Amino acid sequence: MREPILFTVMASSLGEILLAGTTNGLTHVSFQAGSHPLMPQPNWRRDDEVWLTAVSQLTAYFAGDLHTFDLPLAPQGTPFQQQVWAYLQTIPYGRTTTYGSIAHELGNPKSTRAVGAANGRNPLAIIVPCHRVVGSNGQLTGYAGGLPIKEALLGLERNGRLGTAQQLSFF
């Protein structure tokens, strides 16, 4: 029998965020106002208490008081996706990198598109910081939460407040 999926929804300065997972860890963090909101399935159970620590850490992140998350994570993905998601967690707060740089660091410089696809399938927004990856020219590229949310997250990390693309400097 599979473990039940437990979820909660938290308010943030960027809209509602759905957190879901099992007792093994978070499997999803989704901006509900984004282009791909995650909807709770009928067999999921709302449990606000199980995600109190995650909500507390995300709240501290949005306040500019937390730069590194310490939460149990259990995202589901292919071995390559898991490798990319693990690498994303090494990108320092307030810094950006490119898809090509990640492909190079992972030992396969020709896998830039595959890195982009894995980045795009990251189920743990903010916590696995895919928003810190930009195009090779420094331009913002797609984000499941939408580019305005990506701009805001990068502004928060650069300037201590939610920002816009005009306020950002890359690399």
Image (tube, helix red, strand yellow):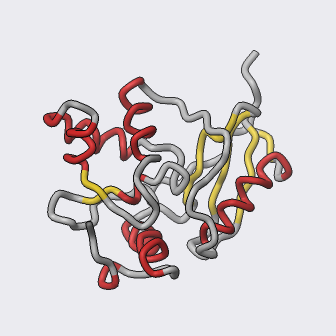
Location of residue 52 in the rendering, given as x and y in whole percent from the top left corner: 80, 54
Say above or below: 82 vs 122.
Answer: above
Say above or below: 149 vs 42.
Answer: below
Q: Is residue 102 left or right of residue 81?
A: left
Identify the residue at horizontal 38%, vertical 59% (top origin): 132
Location of residue 82 in the rendering, given as x and y in whole percent from the top left corner: 44, 31
Q: Is residue 105 left or right of residue 57?
A: left
Location of residue 141 in the rendering, given as x and y in whole percent from the top left corner: 27, 60
Mark count? 0
Identify the residue at horizontal 46%, vertical 54% (top origin): 129
Q: Is residue 68 left or right of residue 130?
A: right
Residue placed most toward the observer, 62 or 5: 62
Residue placed most toward the observer, 95 or 4: 95
Name the image quarter holding residue 155. Answer: bottom left
Say above or below: 57 vs 152.
Answer: above
Quadrant for the N terminus, please.
top right
Name the image quarter holding residue 105. Answer: top left
Residue placed most toward the observer, 154 or 39: 154
Identify the residue at horizontal 63%, vertical 75% (top origin): 63
Location of residue 140 in the rendering, given as x and y in whole percent from the top left corner: 28, 66
Identify the residue at horizontal 29%, vertical 56% (top origin): 97
